[in-house]
Amino acid sequence: MRFSLAHFKPTLAASVIACIMIGMLAPRLLAFLPALLGLIFLVHQWGHAKQFHLSFLTKKVVFLTVAFGLMLASSQWSPEPSFSIERFYKIILLSIPSFILLSLIKETKLPRDKTYIKATIGIFISSCLFLVFEENSGHFFNKAITSRETNYAQLNRNFVIFSFLAIIALFSATRFIGNIKWKWAMGTTLATLSFLTLYFSESQTAQLNFLCGLFFLFIFPIKSKIIGKLFFGFIIILTLTMPVTLPKTTDFINTAISQETLRSGIIQKASTKARFTVWESTVIEIKKKPLLGHGLEAQRFMKTEHLKNHFKKVENPKALHAHNAILQIWVEFGLAGILLAILFLIFIYRKIYREENLDVRRLYLTLFAISFCSTMTGFGIWQGWQLGQIFIFTALAIMIGNTLKHKSAQS
């Protein structure tokens, strides 16, 4: 008899949803929750079956070994080796148990889809009320808990997590609710509440995530594998050529659009000019060490003349990261890291487009798209809460996908 985590009470599905709810209130905790779940259920599996049932393909193990090996090796040429090694161990501790979690739930489905729908919509509505209240109350809960002024970058994390939750809730409502009228009514209500909540957000990353998610959820032609190949092919080409194409793109934008426009309105709120400067500075550093990069998390210790010239009012200006996943991999690991990233993209493409159930394929592609959007426009890719966010929503997506495939097989 095959071991099933569905027999564990409380169920894995309830645990994952609870983690998302906790992450909405305290994003930093989301860094540890997927890893903690992975360890808890691994120990439970041993207690139940006196053996481990983990399905890791040899290719995946080899890939992760090489990737982690490059991270560790890069600390040797990092400007601050001790910090890079410390960050490496943190990534290992957070990611390996999280990969175990994904392996454990590979064949686990939602035990009660109606209960799941109610729980997801309940958490979604609660999140809307919480975020709107926080933005309009002077961040009441944050001040009560931390006793200090709100860090807007930290509060923006709540909205980024919310954008993931909103897309998952929309997908679930439009796939699990059978009655057409109820389906459209609930979908319209959730979309409207999402727009209203994100209207109050200072995070353009969260807003872009949601818009990107809507496009892939309702518009992108998921049936065509050719279009899928073109989409991933474009991302791969972008990954390889970004150090060359990005400076030309920013130069064109700076020439075509007036500086006054770039420093006003929503463009100014998105820190567009500052992002351009950080990206340009990152490209300069990439060209110094294009093959192996500067090492894990090296950018936070770099003090470049380019940044000094643009942020003259700031003493010793530095960028903690590139605010762009592709550039961050380039500057930290060079071409070696980029080749590994491309292999990962090919794996993701195959995983998505080998899925014959079109609803499940759409769910997986949408999750990939908003994850990619999030890492390309805002936060550093090794930030613990962001890794946890991707792991926990991937776990939930796998269970939703398994449930949809099970329902499809029964009908």
Image (tube, rainbow, N blue to C red):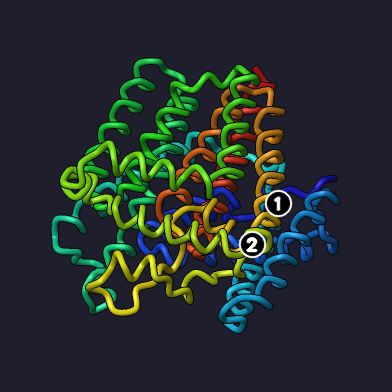
In the rendered view, does 126 fall on the left or right side of 132?
Answer: right
Q: How many marks?
A: 2
Q: Which quadrant is the N terminus positioned in? A: top right
In the rendered view, does 286 fall on the left or right side of 97?
Answer: left
- Picture residue at 60% right of the left edge, 52% below the top: 12
For label 2, count other residues whose C-alpha is less than 10 Å away and answer few (under 14), some (14-19) or many (20+).
many
Can you give x and y, in whole percent of width and height, for residue 291 in the image?
Answer: 68, 59
- Picture residue at 57% right of the left edge, 37% below the top: 235
In the rendered view, does 344 fall on the left or right side of 223?
Answer: right
Of circles 2 and 1, which is in front? 2
Vertical relation: 203 (above or below) 167: below
Vertical relation: 24 (above or below) 356: below
Report the front residue among 184 and 1: 184
For label 1, count other residues whose C-alpha is less than 10 Å away and answer few (under 14), some (14-19) or many (20+).
some
Can you give x and y, in whole percent of width and height, for residue 203 in the image?
Answer: 30, 51
Q: Where is mark 1, residue-wise?
A: 340
Residue type beneath disc 2: Phe
Quadrant assignment, res 89:
bottom right
Question: Which comes before the other along the chain, label 2 or label 1?
Answer: 2
Q: Secondary structure at mark 2?
A: helix
Can you give x and y, in whole percent of width and height, for residue 55 in the image?
Answer: 80, 50
Q: Secondary structure at mark 1?
A: helix
- Say whether residue 110 is visible: no
For the residues labelled 2 and 1, the Cα–Cα distance comes to 10 Å
- Picture residue at 40% right of the left edge, 30% below the top: 214
In the rendered view, does 390 fall on the left or right side of 98?
Answer: left
Q: Where is mark 2, residue-wise?
A: 333
Pointer 2 with pointer 1, Cβ within 8 A: yes
Vertical relation: 182 (above or below) 298: above
Vertical relation: 346 (above or below) 29: above
Q: Which quadrant is the C terminus positioned in? A: top right
Report the front residue among 56 and 13: 56
